[in-house]
Image (spheres, rainbow, N blue to C red):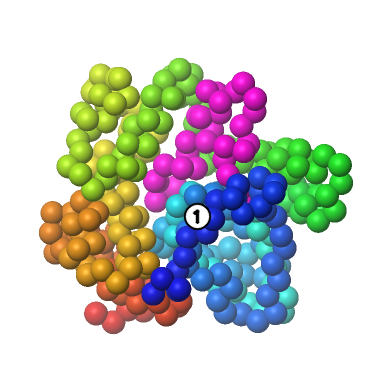
Amino acid sequence: MADEYFVELNINNEYDVPFKMCAQIFSEKGLVTAAHIHEDIEMLYAIKGNFEAYLDGACHEFSEGDLLVINSREIHMVYALTGGDSCYVMCRFALENLQMVGQKKDMRKYMLPFVINMPHQQKVFRKEELEKYDIHRLMLEALDEQKNERFGFELAIKCNILKVLVAVLRIRGLWDSEKAALFSDRMGDITKGFEYIDKSYASNIKIENVADICSMRYSYFSRVFKSITKLSFSQYLLNVRLREAEYKLATTERSITDIAFECGFSSSSYFVSKFRHEKGITPKQYRKMMHDKVIKTPSQWIS
């Protein structure tokens, strides 16, 4: 099973430059990227053809002129729905490499939406909403810079990636000037809270524990947390636990009961119930799908 699904190296460990860009062309339809995960952010910009990605428990179709954004540690698998030299531009990078010298504090409010676990945030950005940001030109320019490696190409690519991320943030509308001003002074503390959840999801953590770690009053932290994630604390924690369960289902042969307890669920039956409710399939069906490398919608499963 481990060969079917793998964890890719961080971009900083795999390449000499802090990002990877390439055009990927597919002459036939079918699986083009088997299920995998990485810490980096990845963007797929469709140049030609139609594609489907299994991402974060759901299927997302994207076509010519559309952009798919894959957050850090999101399990993903991609199919080409059309042949005939279908093509997309792949861009993968580590967010920390985009920070400006002396601006780490201010950059956190832009980076946070790409690393926290928000399964219902927009993943596919359509051609019509991207046109005013000139995303097509930005992606092709960056690809050309990567290919030719002219003097300063790293800076040129970084500049274009930042412009694409600005477009993504503005279209998603997660932040406005009022929220940015409200949270910016405490962004470092807030980030500590999300990091703690990622490390301690298997334990019986409460929102009060996280508020203490962030050095905030419970009431204030609760308001900030809901404003950022659009989720209650319990729902967010559930999403993190399910994400880690997906990882274990795909990469190990551990029993569903063991995985349930390792991810913080009180029983295997509760885990199966929540997994099916959120993902549309059972943990067993999910594991089979990753093993078979075949995307299926909930309606295609036979109970």
Assign the C terminus to one quadrant of the image. bottom left
Classify 10 Å Cα crowding around label 1: few (below 14), some (14-19), many (20 and above).
many
Give the residues in magenta: 92-121
Assign the N terminus to one quadrant of the image. bottom left
Q: Is residue 289 left or right of residue 45?
A: left
Of residue 58 and residue 154, the one placed in the foreground of this image is: 154
From the top left corner, tell me how far across and down residue 257 is, in percent. 17, 65
Of residue 156 and residue 120, the one placed in the foreground of this image is: 156
Q: Is residue 134 visible?
A: no
Residue depicted at x 47% and y 39%: 113
Residue depicted at x 36% and y 36%: 194
Q: Is residue 285 visible?
A: yes
Is 105 contained in the magenta span?
A: yes
161 in relation to 28, above or below: above
The answer to which image quadrant residue 4 occupies is bottom left
90 in relation to 197, above or below: below
Is 262 contained in the magenta span?
A: no
Question: How many discs appear?
Answer: 1
Of residue 67 and residue 291, the one placed in the foreground of this image is: 291
Q: Is residue 281 left or right of residue 107?
A: left
Give the SS element for disc 1.
loop
The answer to which image quadrant residue 278 occupies is bottom left
136 in relation to 208, above or below: below
Residue depicted at x 60% and y 23%: 103
From the top left corner, tell me how far across and down residue 21 is, in percent. 70, 55
Q: Is residue 189 left or right of residue 207?
A: right
From the top left corner, tell me how far across and down residue 237 is, in percent. 27, 44
Q: Which residue is mark 1?
A: 38
From the top left corner, tell me how far across and down residue 186 is, in percent. 41, 20
Q: Which amino acid lies under the numbered mark 1 shown in the image of this protein?
A: His
